Image: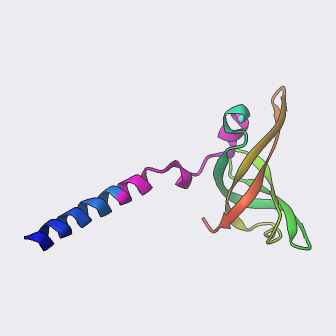
C-alpha cells in the first residue's frame, strides 16, 4: 500500500512538472515584427527568434549577424562562438536591446546568449 501511494505521488509530481515546463514562456519564438512594433515592452527581456542569416561578420570569436524571419530583420551580436554564415537557419535566445524609434524605424539588436538549430 505504501509503495502504491509513493508511486501515485511520484506520477502526479512528474505530470505537474511537465505541465509547468510546457507552460513556460521561455520556449516561445517571438516574431521580429512583434519585437520591433513594441520595443519598449521587450527591452532588456530575454527573447527567442528564429530565421535565416542574411549578413554575417565574425572575427576572433566575436560576431554580428542579421536574422530575417520573414516578418522583419534584426542584428544579433555575439561575444563567443563567432557568427554563423550567411544563409544558415538559426534560432537565437538573447537579450533584446532597443536604442530608439524614429517614425517607422526602430534601432534594436539582440545580444546572443544561446544559439540553436530551429
> Which residue of the protein is positioned furthest toward the left in this rendering?
1
Q: Quarter of the image for the N terminus: give it.
A: bottom left
Question: Quick check: 39 above or below 81?
Answer: above
Question: Quick check: 102 above or below 96?
Answer: above
> Does the stretch in magenta take in 94?
no
For the point 81% across and 69% down, the residue is 80
Question: How many marks do you count on the picture?
Answer: 0
> Which residue of the protein is positioned furthest toward the front in this rendering?
2
User: Quick one: 100 or 14, which is closer to the camera?
Assistant: 14
> Does the stretch in magenta take in 25?
yes
Position of 76 with respect to 8 (left or right) is right
Any part of residue 56 in sight: no
Question: Quick check: 12 above or below 6?
Answer: above
Position of 1 with respect to 78 (left or right) is left
For the point 32% across and 56% down, the residue is 16
In this picture, which residue range is highlighted in magenta? 17-38
Question: Quick check: 109 above or below 7?
Answer: above
Amino acid at each position: 500500500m505504501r509503495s502504491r501511494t509513493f508511486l501515485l505521488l511520484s506520477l502526479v509530481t512528474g505530470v505537474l512538472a511537465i505541465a509547468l515546463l510546457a507552460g513556460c514562456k521561455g520556449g516561445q519564438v517571438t516574431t521580429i515584427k512583434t519585437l520591433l512594433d513594441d520595443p519598449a515592452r521587450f527591452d532588456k527581456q530575454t527573447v527567442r527568434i528564429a530565421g535565416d542569416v542574411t549578413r554575417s561578420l565574425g572575427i576572433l570569436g566575436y560576431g554580428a549577424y542579421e536574422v530575417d524571419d520573414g516578418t522583419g530583420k534584426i542584428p544579433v551580436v555575439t561575444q563567443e562562438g563567432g557568427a554563423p554564415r550567411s544563409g544558415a537557419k538559426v534560432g537565437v535566445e538573447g537579450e533584446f536591446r532597443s536604442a530608439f524609434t524614429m517614425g517607422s524605424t526602430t534601432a534594436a539588436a539582440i545580444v546572443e546568449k544561446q544559439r540553436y538549430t530551429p
